[in-house]
Image (tube, rainbow, N blue to C red):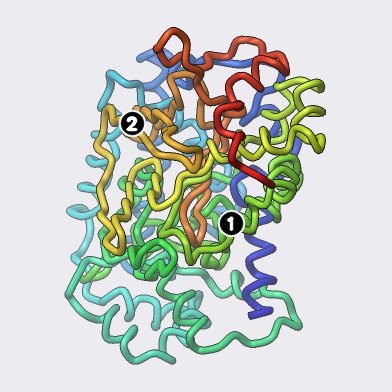
Amino acid sequence: MKYFSLLTLVAISTALVIPNDEVMSQVTFEPHHTSDSVFGRLPSQKNSNELANQAESTFSKLINTGKNAFDQAIEYAQGTGEKVQKSCRQATFDANSWLESSSESVEQKIRDIEEYGKHGHHEPNMTVYELIAKSEYTTKLAALINEYEDLVQLLNGTAANYTVFAPIDSAFEKIPEHAPKPSKEQLKKLLLYHTSQEFYPAGRVLVTHTIPTLLVGEEIGGKPQRLSTNINLKGLTVNFYSRIIAINVFGTNGVIHGIDNLLVPPPKSADIIQLLPGEFSTLELGLAKTGLFKAINDTSNHVGGTLFAPSNFAFQKLGPKINAFLFSSYGLKYLKALLKYHVVANQTLYSDAYYRAEDTAVDETGIPKGYFHVDLPTLLEDKSLSIDVARYGRIINIKINAFSTVTIEDGIAADGVIHVVSNVLIPPKSLGGMTQQWDGEELEVEGLKERLEPYTAFDEL
């Protein structure tokens, strides 16, 4: 277990946020300038087409490397060094600007590239297991898989077109030197977390935010635990930290993508918050002082969940007076009510998938392209969050109560998902029999108390 804790700490230290704090302040939270929507920063159609052409050229070169074997893909990436890394990084980083809401051109170009990759080369003659087993770059991964006969049979079989995110040998060298060896059960979970039973060639990965794996999420109702795909300064990554370095190595029963870090099954939501004090120290303090941290961390009373996590900057936007009040002994009951409004139990809303729990049954629904609306009941009595998801290819814009924006989606957790929000979410108030949502107007302490008072009367800390 210590082995997994060490790996988790390494992984989570870069999860949810781009590691460099200076870059993070400019890219994600943008404290010095704000925009109402990501759509407001999209380029013109002309620029989108230019970026699409650039991406087509880059991805064509990468896809050509998968024509024979995994080794050729790895050697191509390593042989061209910084040049190909810079080119790939530029293409993938700009992908957020490719997909305008009115344009399908980029997705079509990616489909064309993949068709070229399929028809321009010989048909594959090895399974994904055989490709991994015979590659000189995945000897350690192959040795682990060989410990489990059922996994060998699975990856040699034709029950599905599998996708394997295969860590190369150098990824294993990042394991702390003195880490104790994990149990066979833990290692099997690790391997299952690198494999999906659905077919995700590079083009589909590029326009997908989360991918289901073969790892059963015990704390999300037995549904597939998911991976997140991200575009950041590293390029195209999985779970924010593992960079995809080789793509579209096709086997007879699926596809392999090479990655440079192990993918560690995630910890619980509350533990992730605790591991990222640079972004969530205020939220962590609030959850601890109100007793909600323990309640959220206890997965015996809920099946999955969604946490909308205000960053430290989001709390700062409330102003010093409100923060001083909320974290005073008198204000704690108001703080508890406020934080309850950020927690959804038994419903796990990823940006492109939706797990709902009804008693012990969990229903899985994909979020369609275009527009999707759902009301999520929170821990605050009778109060739901109004969620609007606008999804166009890679671009996903999530609005809460028609005002607050999710700035970082899909922080994958063992017991659900975390979305970072741009503002602390303020419950609505009743005015003349009508419900009035908070739309960002400046709040005073008395105004906040008025909104939260109805939920504090019977809530003793």
Query: Label 2 to label 1, Cα distance in Å?
Result: 33 Å
Nearer the observer, 443 or 455: 455
- Residue 17 image-quadrant placement: top right
Q: Nearer the viewer, mark 2 or mark 1?
A: 1
In the shown orientation, is residue 165 left or right of residue 252? right
| Residue type, label 1 | Ala
Instruction: Classify 10 Å Cα crowding around label 1: few (below 14), some (14-19), many (20 and above).
Output: some
Please give the residue where the numbered disc 2 appears in the rendered image: 391
Q: Where in the figure is residue 445, as x and y percent of width and height? A: 72, 18
Determine the residue positioned at 47% across, 61% down: 301
Compared across the picture, whether 367 is left or right of 206 comes to left
Give coordinates of residue 177: x percent, y percent: 74, 80
Please name whichever residue, 129 or 360, is drawn nearer the observer in this view of the structure. Answer: 360
Q: Residue drawn at (47%, 16%), measured in percent from left and top? A: 430
Nearer the observer, 139 or 228 = 228
Whether residue 59 is situated above or below residue 407 in the rendered picture: below
Q: Secondary structure at mark 2?
A: strand
The residue where tag 1 is placed is 295
- Tell me if 311 is positioned left or right of 58 in this view: right
Q: Residue at x 31, y 88 (%)?
A: 150
Q: Quadrant of the N terminus?
A: bottom right
**Above or below for 378 versus 262:** above
At horizontal 34% and vertical 83% (from top left) the residue drawn is: 151
Q: Residues within 10 Å of mark 2 (few under 14, many from 20)?
A: some
**Quick check: can you spot residue 115?**
yes
Three-letter amino acid code of the residue under disc 2: Arg
- Mark positioned earlier in the residue sequence (2 or 1): 1
Residue 286 coordinates in the image, percent (x, y): 71, 43
Give the vertical position of 233 relative to 69 (above or below): above
Say which element carries label 1.
helix
Q: What is the quadrant of residue 281 in the picture? A: top right
